[in-house]
Image (cartoon, grey):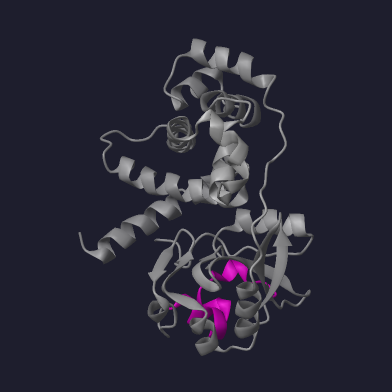
Amino acid sequence: MKPDTAREAWQRFVEAFEPLRPELYRYCRFLTRSAWDAEDLVQDTLARGLVTLGCLFQDIENPRAWLFRVASNLWIDRQRRLREIATENVAPAAAASADCLSVEGREAAATLVGRLAPQERAAVILKDVFAFTVEETAEILTTTQGAIKAALHRGRGKLAEPDVEYPRVASSVIDAFADAFNARDLDRLVALLLDTATADVVGLAKEYGPGKMKQSDTGSLYHSLFSPISHAVQPEYLSGYSGELARVERRDYRGESILVSWYDHDEGPAVRDVIRIIDDNGQVASIAFYFFCPEVIAEICSELGVPCRSNGYRYWPTSS
């Protein structure tokens, strides 16, 4: 298949399922307890959904339930794999050295000791939060109604648990990135990147290497620095936008340093993008732009207490 054909199929799929995205994000957020992980699960669900849809011969009667099933299966499978890895690799004697685990290891461990088994958690959320019936919940989780009733009975008393967030080490590279960005200094910005760095416009595009990011036609860094958002955002989301370029500001979100992108509007500045940077020994290893992830932007800005605006889910116009 040609890249253009695959891209067109993906764009049509993303567009068709737009109305379900807010609920899908909420469901994934309940499962993962993290805005970042929730959006990752949303994107994985959509990608798996597109592949699965191509293998179906019948029409989907309930797209909402079908999409939730895809997300549930992905998440439950992921938790089971994590449990298996933990069982294989963590000996009782290793408990005393837990402080030596990586951040990723501690996050996985926190997930593994959660009070609910994966299917219990999914069942309670589907039934009690999203109001699926027991029959629908059983269908989504591909099990029996009796098993769902049992999972609900076990899980309801155990679900109340606080969100667990783990601090990440703040890096000076983020400040250097912000300074270069606000100075519109593309060369200085690129100099911060590893040769193997990636940039992800989450859900829509991925770039490998600084050379791709600084290209004037499609490069994410070039357009972030020098292009008004009106070239990429549908008109219905641009009310009051002044046309000015973004300026970024470092903020702390749950112990992690992130960048928020401010854009001027008639009623004042508002955040329209959240940027997450992963560094490796003082250089940028990856950049994630959440520009087309309105649920993530809204959640983080609400917690930070700053105004925000949505850009929708895509840059292309609605198919005729």
| Left or right of residue 256: residue 82 | left
Q: Quadrant of the N terminus?
A: bottom left
Q: Is residue 305 left or right of residue 213?
A: right
Please check the rendered image and state whether residue 227 is part of the magenta-colored stretch, yes or no: yes
Does residue 1 lie above or below 246 as drawn? Answer: above
| x, y percent for residue 258 | 65, 65
Marks counted in the figure total 0
Locate the C terminus by quadrant.
bottom left
Q: Nearer the viewer, residue 229 or 167?
A: 167
Specify the segment rendered in magenta. Answer: 219-240
Q: Is residue 121 above or below residue 181?
A: above
Q: Residue reaching furthest top?
A: 146
Relative to residue 198, is residue 108 depicted above or below? above
User: At x 71% / y 32%, what residue is drawn?
Assistant: 161
Can I make out residue 246 in this image? no
Residue 257 position, x and y percent, is 67, 64
Q: Is residue 291 left or right of residue 158?
A: left
> Residue 242: percent from the left, percent from the top?
68, 81
Q: Nearer the viewer, residue 11 or 97?
A: 97
* Magenta stretch holds residue 162: no
Question: At 42% across and 32% down in the image, what residue appears?
Answer: 88
Name the quadrant containing residue 227: bottom right
Front residue of this view, candidates 116 and 308: 116
Residue furthest toward the left? 1
